Image: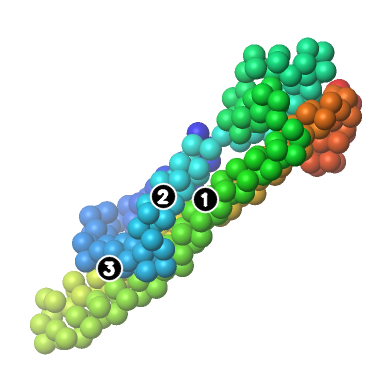
Amino acid sequence: MDIATVIGIVGGFAVLIAAILLEGSSPMSFVNVLPGVVVLGGTAMAILVRYTMGSFAAAIVLGLKSAVLYKHVSPTKLIDQIAEIAETMRRQGPIALEQVEIEDKFFQRGVRMIADGFSAEALRASLERERDLDYERVEEGHRIFKVMGDTAPGMGMVGTLIGLVSMFGHMDDPKKIGPGMAIALLATFYGAAISNVFALPISDKLAHRAQEEGTNRTLIIEALVMIREGRNPTTIRDELASYLPLHHREKMLEAA
C-alpha cells in the first residue's frame, strides 16, 4: 500500500474539518444534499459524456487501486534480481528459470517465455504489447481523474448560481435568504475540495505511476532480451545501469 496517498487524502480532508472546528462552526453546518448532488452528480454526468460507462467505472476502480495499492519497485533491486537470473541462465540453462520465484507478474511472464524457448524477437514483441496496453489503461484513469478535477469546480459554480438565484428569488422572505446563501457557498466549497484534495492529486499520482511502471517494464524487456541472447550478467548489469540516476548508478556498480 502507498501510505503517502492514504495520508494525503485523509489528511487533506482532516485539515478541512479541523479548520471548521477551530473556527467554531459545526461540521454538520457544512453538510447539504443539494450542492453535493449538483457537484458530484454533475461531475459524473460530464465524465460520462466524454467516456463510456465501462471506461468510467474501470478508471475509477483501476485509478484508486493503482494510487493506493501500488507497490514501488526500486530499479536498483530490479537490476540485481535480473543479474541473478542472468547468472542462473548462464550456469544452468533456460530450464532452470522455471524454478525462479518472481513477485512481479510481468517479469515472471517474461522469464517463463525464455524458459519455454521463445525467441528474442517474439519475447520483445509480446512484452512491449502488454506494456503499452497496461500503460494505456493507467493513462485513461489519469485522464478521467483529470477531467473530474477540472469539472468539479465548474459544477460548484453552477451550484453557486442555483443558490444565488434561489436567494434572490426569496428576498421578501428573510428566512430563505440564509439557506440560499449556504447552498451557494457550499457548492463552491465542495467543488474546490473534491478537485484539489482528491481528483487532481489522484490524477497526478496515476501519471507518475504510468511513467514509473513504463520505465521499469522497458528495463525488464531490455534485460530479458539480453538474457535470451546469452549476454554476460556483468554486461547486462552495466547496460541497465543507464536507467538509474548517476549517484545510484555509481553505488550499484561499486557494490557489484
Which residue is rendered at x = 23% and y = 83% of the image?
A: 165
Label 1 amino acid?
Arg
Q: Nearer the viewer, mark 3 or mark 2?
A: 2
Residue 233 position in % (x across, y down): 85, 24
How far across and how far down the image is residue 74, in percent? 68, 33
Task: Name the residue tied to disc 1.
Answer: 137
Mark 2 or mark 1, earlier in chain: 2
For the residues marked 3 and 1, what is the alpha-carbon distance in whole angstroms? 29 Å
Q: Which residue is mark 2?
A: 58
Q: Where on the picture, by quarter, is residue 87?
A: top right
Q: Amino acid at mark 3?
A: Val
Q: Is residue 185 left or right of residue 124?
A: left
On the image, the x and y values in percent for residue 96 come to 71, 14
In the rendered view, how is the structure colored? rainbow
Decide if residue 247 is in sight here. no
User: Is 10 drawn above or below residue 145 in the view shown?
Assistant: above
Residue 152 position within the rendered picture, expressed as x and y whole percent measured from the top left: 39, 66
Mark 3 vs mark 2, CA separation in Å? 23 Å
Q: Is residue 49 above or below residue 22?
A: below
Distance from label 2 to label 1 (Cα)?
A: 9 Å
Residues 14 and 163: in front is: 163
Closer to the eye: label 3 or 1 = 1
Residue 70 shows in the view: yes
The disc, 3 or 1, on the residue closer to the chain's N-terminal end is: 3
- Residue 50 vertical position relative to residue 64 in the rendered view, above or below: below
Q: Which residue is mark 3?
A: 38
Please say if the residues under marks 2 and 1 sit with CB atoms less than 8 Å apart.
Answer: yes
